[in-house]
Image: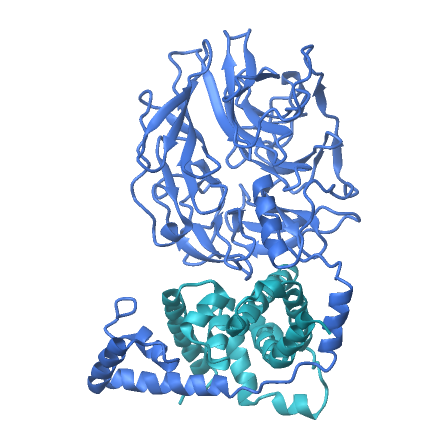
Chain colours: A cyan, B blue
Amino acid sequence: MTREQSDFDRLFEEYADAIYGFALRLVGDPDRAADIAQDTFIKAHRRLDTLTDPGAARAWLFRIASNTAIDEMRRYRWTRPFGTDAARYEQRPDPQPGPEAQAMAGTLDHRLQVALLKLKAQQRQCLLLSDLEGMAASEIGVVMDLSPGAVRTLLSRSRADMRRLLAAEGMTR
Amino acid sequence: MTFRGSDHPDELLSASLSGDLSAEELARLDRHLAECSRCRDELDALSADRRALSSMQTPRAPRDLEARVRAGIEQPSSRRTWFVGLGASVATIAAAIAVAALLGRLPNEPGSSPSPVPSGSEIASPSIVEPTPEPSVAAAFLAPGDLGYFILSGDVGAQQLVFHNDRTGAEIVAPTTSGAILAASLSPDGQWLAYISRKGESGANEVWALNLADSSSVRLGCSVQFPFTERLAWSADSSLLAYTLAANDIGPSAGCNEPEAVYTTNVWLFEADSRAVRRLTGSEDAYAAMFVQDINSDATALLVSHATTADSSAQPWTEMWKLTAPAQEPIHLWDGVFLPLFGTDQVESTEANVLFFVPLFASDATGFWNLQGGGVPLIGIGSYVTNPIQGIPAISPGFAGSSITEWHVSWSPDGQQFASWSSNSSALFVNSPQAASGGGPDTPVAIDLPSEGAWIVDAAFSPDGADLLVTIGIPSAGIGDPPSSQLVRLALSGGSQSVISEGGANPPWTGPAVFAR
């Protein structure tokens, strides 16, 4: 096995779940999330030589995932111009019939996901990178190609909008 | 730090959750929290939200993900997913390819042919003017960056129209028109120059396509002078030109089509390869907006808007025609949106800058509007990926108080600026989408006018967006004399102005200008 191959394997092993989870929370659909995750790692493999600082691997990989997800969301919406992401999520056919899916419906997780999908895509991205992935503003800036100041402003607005959406979902404290 | 004029440091509250505060900011926030119960409660609420999000289940990746990735690495996918379109020029396409290569994907190759003509559409016989006896001009009449413009010279009845290369001085003779040239649009590959000319004082316009390689021309149709018809849109691969013709009552004796119900509008297409002309729509209320790329099938698609002149209760709307075979029904896209015109360079962003018209006299995009009712247009800047277009309404300066039907817009090549002007005034505005979304500057661009009563005919950005090539119409000297014009180059920074062309002999009409990219 080449060194490059082992580097990639480590990358995949460490981040596959996180990338898939990020994509899933972004688009609300397991099949689309799997496609995004697949495309992300394929691109990452092709561009592995551009990752010069191992310490920046997470931001580098999430940046690829973000751009891939944006591309997918744009493509998906273009062919389905009616309806919102949240509405499609709530009306989707049960993708994994079984006890797991049944338990998911109506839970906090589900209601959070519905609220997330009502945010604009950029806001959703920013919030997930901060609160789900625990990234600092500077790292989010690398992923989303924004200045730390712009991330800070975007995050503040995203939190305020999320607060309103959660309140509308009956999830006030 | 405050947020949007509030006395409460909401951004600091948010940033404190992820540890992004400096020591000074943290101290400032602590002092504020000691005295502000609202912010303490807010911080508690935001913290709870963050805890809830961070505790969301993190599902495992599908078990077959690794296998799928390996398969993809060993056998690259042939699926094309890149959205290029948006009337991209050759340079924009090249930039898109560069960006796509960076992300490991390739867009469509420029110059790919569109699919055959959908069935049921009307085919019109084009009027082809044979090449002039002079030797054929070189294939690239305009090199990248070259400026070209029209010059109409000679006395009435003995006029000559040429297209002039400002750098080389070379000229191509174009079919002589009897009136002013109102609009010009160069195909992205630089092979065709489409233009609209007034038909003397008849009240009609003619649409033409001039081939810059062999100087042949195709007459694309005749139209009543009508709002929003003096526009030309090329597809990104230069294979198609879309334009709007308003039915006229001048009749075939004037070289125009058979008389139809006047003031009805339809979208027409010119196919560059076959030089065929055909009518796309039959609804009599359609206007060509712009081409986009259908990212699922890679087919060229055309945005078409509808606006009625008769029914005051009907709002405008926009649909997308997929120009593929077999013929498909157009897809209804957005209600209340008329003539969406995207800026170029939208390769990576989901927030695309788009100009469009919506009725002013409704608080949202569901009000009533029709062309005869007029009113004041709004310009929306926002995301195109949601439905309907979530525009941030902006009353662009100068629009207020004038008829919606008089206004024209053009984007800079990088989509970071747009110029807007009224065909009945000398006011010319340049805005960035960001500035326009906040209301925009109130002051028109300072421009020296050659005479009283002059009006803006056309404004084209230079490739670097630093200059505008402005065609200024000059009122006629007297009864029976056609108008003339002046072509000036205006530096947007600093405002210096230089006259590029004042045309030839009487009537000295010159312009519009185009740049090859």
Q: Is residue B223 visible?
A: no
Q: Which of B433/B492 is in front?
A: B492
Q: Is B65 situated above or below B306?
A: below
- Tell me where residue B274 sits by quadrant: top right
Q: Is B203 situated above or below B420?
A: above
- Tell me where residue B429 sits by quadrant: top left
Residue B84 horizontal/vertical position (percent): 61, 50
Horizontal relation, residue B321 to residue B466: left or right = right
What residue do we see at 47% from left, 41% from top? B412
Residue B516 horizontal/vertical position (percent): 55, 32
Q: Is B147 situated above or below A25?
A: above
Horizontal relation, residue B309 to residue B120: left or right = left
Q: Is A126 situated above or below B89?
A: below
Q: Is residue B483 visible?
A: yes
What residue do we see at 44% from left, 47% from top? B416
- Tell me where residue B102 sits by quadrant: bottom right
Horizontal relation, residue A96 to residue A107: left or right = right
Quadrant in which the N terminus of chain B appears: bottom left
In this rendering, the count of numbered labels is 0
Residue B407 horizontal/vertical position (percent): 44, 38
Residue B449 horizontal/vertical position (percent): 32, 24
Quadrant in which the C terminus of chain B appears: top right
Q: Which of A143/B331 is in front?
A: A143
What residue do we see at 74% from left, 32% from top? B273
